[in-house]
Amino acid sequence: MTEAIARLGRFGIDSVRHLGRASLLLVQVLASMGEVLRRPRLLLEQLFSVGVLTVLIIAVSGLFVGMVLSLQGYYILSQFAAEATLGVMVAASLVRELGPVVTALLFAGRAGSALTAEIGLMKATEQLSGLEMMAVNPVRRVLTPRFLAGFISMPLLAALFSALGVLGGWFVGVGLLGVDDGAWWGQMQARIDWNEDLMNGVIKSLVFGFTCVWIAIFQGYNSVPTSAGVSGATTRTVVHSSLAVLALDFALTALMFD
Amino acid sequence: MSRRESKSTEASRQRAVQLSAGGQNDAPGQGTASLVRIRDLYFSRGERKIFSGLNIEIPRGRITAIMGPSGTGKTTLLKLIGGQLRPDQGTVEVDGLDVHQLNMKELYRLRMRMGMLFQSGALLTDLNVFENVAFPLREHTRLNEALLRKLVLLKLEAVGLRGARKLMPSELSGGMARRVALARAIALDPMMIMYDEPFTGQDPISMGVLVKLIRQLNDAAGLTSIVVSHDVEETSAIADLLYVISDGRVVESGDPRSLRESGSEWTRQFMHGLPDGPVPFHYPAPPLQADLFGEPA
Amino acid sequence: MKHVKQTEILVGVFMAIGLLALFFLAMKVSNLGTINTGESYRVTARFDNIGSLKAKAPVTMAGVEIGRVVGIGFDKERFQAVVDMDVYANYDQIPEDTYAKILTAGLLGEQYIGLDPGGSDVVLKDGSEIEITQSALVLEEIIGQFIFSKAQGGEK
């Protein structure tokens, strides 16, 4: 019994300590932001590995999610003879929820884990230590460009996901199931508000992007420099990011669309 | 080439004077014979005490070796000198500056004048050999591409790897990686280089190459070298001064020959690699008989 | 250097695709593209019942969107709904005796205003009122009427 309570206490203390360390790291990262913006080359390299390499999985997933949404939506809506609103349903689900959330989950799995593993291995092979001894601040040189690249990439990837989802849904709904093309786009445009729906989706993906890269670089930077440590950190990145994204999504949705 | 190197060392000396004049420490950096001075150092990791009252002086322009069995915190000592770790007590002075009193900016400026060779080389794996050596120059100077290329090639020539400049770190053998790392460490013409276990896991040939390089760099460029190692043979072959540490303090110091003939039993065991002696063969345990036939603990 | 160039291009393409997707969402999926910032003229119409018509609902003629509902008011004296709509300026040849009705897109869809052109030579201009209107179909009323007529039919 006492052991259980002690364990709970230890867990609490550990969590607070981790949060504290993560916050300190975030402050350092944000403080060195100006430096990185003055050296766009560093950012460019990271945009490549964080953004460009994630495009394919996002594009394919977006397309299929949109197609499935359209297919499922059609069977339900056709029971009410409301197929004309299929476009609205597909677009609203994508722009408001699925775009930002699924992109963030895929991002955590594809880019976040890679970031953690890369930084963790750099730590394990003393590369970060080596940078410090070369009088190069590893936070500024290694972490900040990655953070910024993730933050920039996420909304673009989410937009790509949603856009391809709408096109995939259009292909199934209009192309295969025979929903009227004019109704598809017209109803969609009438019901999706650029400010209320689209911008809120973009804000969501900015928040998710921030959270995901923050977790990824912290787990990498804080990992135990052994192979087991790095693999554990990589797993934690994916798990923590996914949970954080889902919890944040609920909170943000409650705030935005009350 | 040696003229150019000595010239740039001269420049780095002048920088050193400016730095120590601007530093908060009042001890003039140039006048003293010791470049690094460690006084009464205490450091522990969690429960484990690593150093308790360590005193070391490292003279300028010579090769000083710090030796001791594995796990005596030799790498930790280098990290303390480089300001990556903070001692519980005691001071580390480098060139008259108290490393742990410096602010971030001053510490980074000091580190630019220190080179460190990590055991693994610590090369940046996503850059090729050339870019690895060019890295500190790109970070800290605004040299144009042509001059930078010349400098890098000269550094690579010094370690004999000019021809390997296009290779990636994963294509290098352990000894070559260490040589590239050495070229990188001297890229900014530092006043001192710290070698962390430079001979571990090297075949006899690359060991010989490294011994020659360390000696050569030290003498040609007027560097101060600190070698941390447990390889008695090679280390005593190049060191001018040896410190033997154990249990968190210096056991004995002196030039290699005097240590070899040391009266201390411990030092003798270490220097000659005897399996048993003051450092017992057995990890502390109850008597074997009691363990085998007595009550299980 | 060639490698760097390639990275640059790919990152550029990535950014372009992302921004293009965002632009597509804004213009084609959301209403940003249909918010007409150009010239338009204001026309009003009175309805006995507007159902669930809302501001920003489209105003169409022959299925083509030619304007937007901008405001819905209430006439306290005549107990009617007053709907203000902006008709885009390039549709300036709409006869005065045009017939406005409130329609529903699909059974459960959005309600919008459909205009059927009349035959007059006089055209609508800023401030005109559409005189002939038809209210929204309210489902309960239709069902009510249906049951009522059935009941009457049964008595005969």
Image: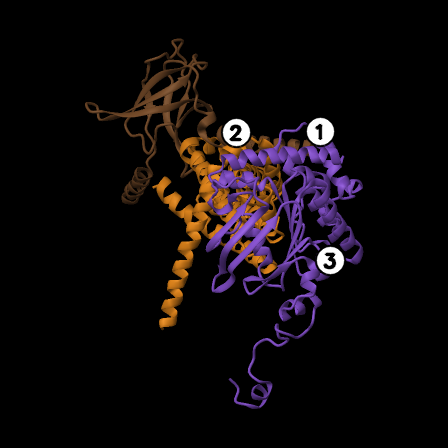
Chain colours: A orange, B purple, C brown
What residue lies at 54% left-to-right and 54% top-to-bottom?
A223
Q: Which residue is mark 3?
A: B234
Chain letter of the residue carrying label 2: C
Taking depth in this image into account, of A149 and A101 the one nearest to the observer is: A149
Mark 1 and mark 2: Cα distance apart in space: 46 Å
Amino acid found under the numbered disc labelled 2: Phe
> Given the current orientation, which residue lies at the most extreme top position?
C121
Is A193 situated left or right of C15 in this image? left
Q: Earlier in the sequence, mark 1 or mark 3?
A: 1
Amino acid found under the numbered disc labelled 1: Leu
Taking depth in this image into account, of A158 and A169 the one nearest to the observer is: A158
Chain letter of the residue carrying label 3: B
Q: Which residue is mark 2?
A: C23
Residue A51's disc is none
Measuring from the top left, give residue A75's x and y in whole percent. Answer: 50, 47
Comparing labels 1 and 2, the label whose residue is closer to the camera:
1
Residue B147's disc is 1
Comparing labels 2 and 3, the label whose residue is closer to the camera:
3
Measuring from the top left, give residue B2's x and y in whole percent. Answer: 75, 36
What residue lies at 60% left-to-right and 56% top-to-bottom?
B75
Mark 1 and mark 3: Cα distance apart in space: 36 Å
Q: Are marks 2 and 3 on the same chain?
A: no
Chain letter of the residue carrying label 1: B
Is B65 situated left or right of A1 in this image? right
- Residue B287 vertical placement versus A176 (above, below): below
